[in-house]
Image: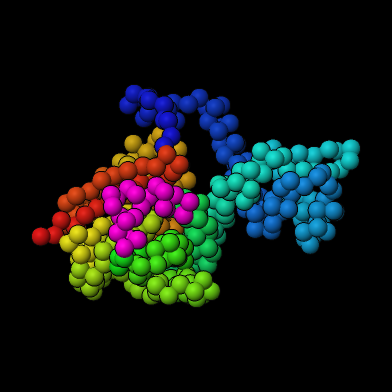
Amino acid sequence: MCDVPTLSAPEKNNRHANAAPDAFEERLVTALNESGLMLLLSLGHRTGLLSAMAGAAPETSTALAMRTKLDERYVREWLGGMVAGGVIETDPQAATYWLPDPHAQLLTDKSPANLAIYSQFIAILGSVEDDVVRCFREGGGVPYSRYPRFQEVMASDSGQTVLPALFDAILPLAEGLTERLECGMHVLDCACGRGRALMAMAERFPASRFVGYDLSQEAIDWARRETARAGLTNLAFEVRDLSDFDTTAEPDAFDLVTTFDGIHDQARPRSLLRGIHRSLAPDGVYLVQDIHASSHHHLDREHPLGTMLYAVSVSHCMTVSLAQGGEGLGTMWGRERALAYLEEAGFCDIEVHQLEHDIQNDYFVCRPGKG
């Protein structure tokens, strides 16, 4: 959880609007530079250049290109951008370059949080800009098929936010849940993506049975391959459209249902939530991770990732829902609306938590309250 400076309402509302013209211009120039930096970081991550430079001695662009089997001209230009961006250091006399260790700690897998992973979102979202502009003029949305790498990047994101905290921080939010999983529960993860959280739980709790549903054939195919490779016999995946889950869910079938960042881009989130309530046993638990935000724009001014998350919403989460004829709830649907939707679905016992390591998400522990 981050410490946000306390401002009065007028100060909050006018912080950007009252900025001096010179300061606003400087802010825009900085934003342009930082946007370019994100594209360069994404290239460095995907080509392996950042990882290759982590802990390595200073070397020339030619040596680095040979070591990474990449084209030297592209490597040299990328290095120039990284030097200009203050990420990589250079010795102009020796024409060598190196990645300082404190930077490598944040931009490679040398530490638990590889921030270069998130830079990939900029290029992915930018690739559909023409489609989004068309939607602004004509309505509708951009389908999932236009985002061939989104599931891959989301799986990497989840690998840094959900997986490291799953057993020690997230599951213990529901009292007694870990013990019940050890004894044996029937568990469903809706909108499971590549299912990495399910795989981790299936391995940790062999007495429990796990099922994952997702709309993406690519994600489910990947999850099935990895499950078979790991030899997990208590885990299955199914391609499933959850927009009618309120009527197709098997009643009282699951002891635990989870959604990790999976509600706000659904075509019909209310139907999914009603279906989850329907599918839970009377003593079941629904554990939700979703974006920490307010349902009111003016209250998102101080959100540390607010602007970025609205960009993700316009260019992915909201529009993929609208492409299915859905509600278009959007990434920043907010805690207030989330609570209202959960109560409407029938959940009467709802706890809201935040985790210290995760400024991006809220965690809801919901019980169905069935008689």
Q: Is residue 180 visible?
A: yes
Q: Is residue 142 visible?
A: no
Q: Magenta stretch mostly in which secondary structure?
A: helix
Q: Give the quarter of the image for residue 256.
A: bottom left
Image position of 249 (left or right of 298): left
Residue placed furthest toward the right: 93
For the point 38% across and 57% down, the residue is 260
The location of residue 366, given as percent across then percent down, is 24, 53
The location of residue 70, given as percent across then percent down, is 77, 60
Which of 199/59 is in front?
A: 199
Looking at the figure, which quarter contains the N terminus? Answer: top left
Q: Give the quarter of the image for residue 242.
A: bottom left
The location of residue 339, given as percent across then percent down, is 24, 48
Q: Which residues are magenta?
A: 163-183
Image position of 363 (left or right of 251): right
For the point 83% across and 47% down, the residue is 59
Image position of 15 with respect to 298: above or below: above
For the point 66% across and 38% down, the residue is 102
Total labels: the figure holds 0
Which of 177/119 is in front?
A: 177
Q: Is residue 173 magenta?
A: yes
For the point 85% across and 53% down, the residue is 63
Image position of 213 (left or right of 218): left
Q: Is residue 244 magenta?
A: no
